[in-house]
């Protein structure tokens, strides 16, 4: 399986971790605690899950221009996902990653992958190469 690289991330070449594939779209503003990485949206099916250190697969985003700020706070707090996977680039969310990169903070790479493939990865430990190649570990 291969994902499209949106933001390559650090130079080490690959990211490895467990995939948390959300079943519904989420708004980072009010949906994710930026200090802990917990999903706090009372209506979200994955409420109580933590995104910190996971490879987070997002089926879609619920728009908020504050998503970039929440992502930046997650990165600064060390509670960001190891990587982001989304079906299409979300410019607002990715802006938080780009700002962190400009501030020379460690960032999470971002990839584009269709929703069906994301769901197939849920709960699996995978590695994503810098070029987007995905393999089970």
Image: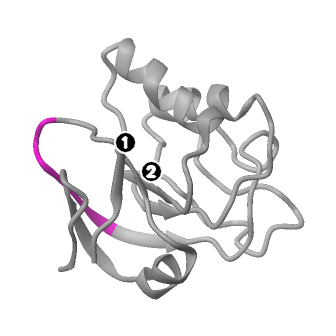
Secondary structure, mark 2, is loop
Crowd rating for badge 2 (residues with CA inside 10 Å; few <14, some 14–19, many 20+) = many
Q: Position of residue 44 (x, y in %)?
A: 81, 68
Q: How many marks?
A: 2
Secondary structure, mark 1, is loop
Q: Quadrant of the C terminus?
A: bottom left
Tell me the residue that label 2 is attached to: 81
Tell me the residue that label 1 is attached to: 108
Q: Position of residue 105 (x, y in %)?
A: 34, 22
Residue at the image position 27 percent from the left and 38 percent from the top? 9
Q: Nearer the viewer, residue 114 or 51?
A: 114
> Compared with residue 93, is residue 104 higher up or lower down, i.e. above or below?
above
Magenta highlight range:
11-17
Image side of residue 41 versus residue 2, left or right: right
**Residue 13 within the segment the image draws in magenta:** yes
The residue positioned farthest toward the top in the image shown: 103
Q: Earlier in the sequence, mark 1 or mark 2?
A: 2
Image side of residue 17 versus residue 33, left or right: left
Q: Position of residue 55 (x, y in %)?
A: 41, 61
> Compared with residue 4, is residue 106 higher up or lower down, i.e. above or below?
above
* Quadrant hosting residue 107: top left
**Residue 87 within the segment the image draws in magenta:** no
Residue at the image position 49 percent from the left and 61 percent from the top? 56
Q: Verify CB contact (< 8 Å) between mark 1 and mark 2.
A: yes
């Amino acid at each position: 399986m291969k994902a499209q690289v949106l933001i390559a991330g650090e130079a080490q070449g690959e990211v490895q971790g467990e995939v948390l594939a959300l079943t519904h779209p989420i708004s980072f503003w009010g949906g994710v605690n930026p200090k802990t990485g917990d999903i706090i949206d009372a209506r979200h099916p994955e409420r109580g899950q933590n995104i910190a250190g996971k490879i987070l697969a997002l089926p879609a985003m619920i728009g908020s221009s504050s998503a970039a700020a929440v992502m930046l706070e997650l990165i600064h707090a060390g509670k960001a996902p190891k990587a982001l996977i989304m079906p299409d680039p979300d410019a607002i969310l990715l802006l938080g990653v780009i700002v962190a990169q400009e501030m020379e903070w460690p960032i999470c790479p971002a990839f584009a992958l269709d929703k069906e493939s994301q769901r197939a990865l849920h709960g699996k430990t995978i590695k994503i190469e810098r070029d987007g190649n995905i393999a089970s570990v």
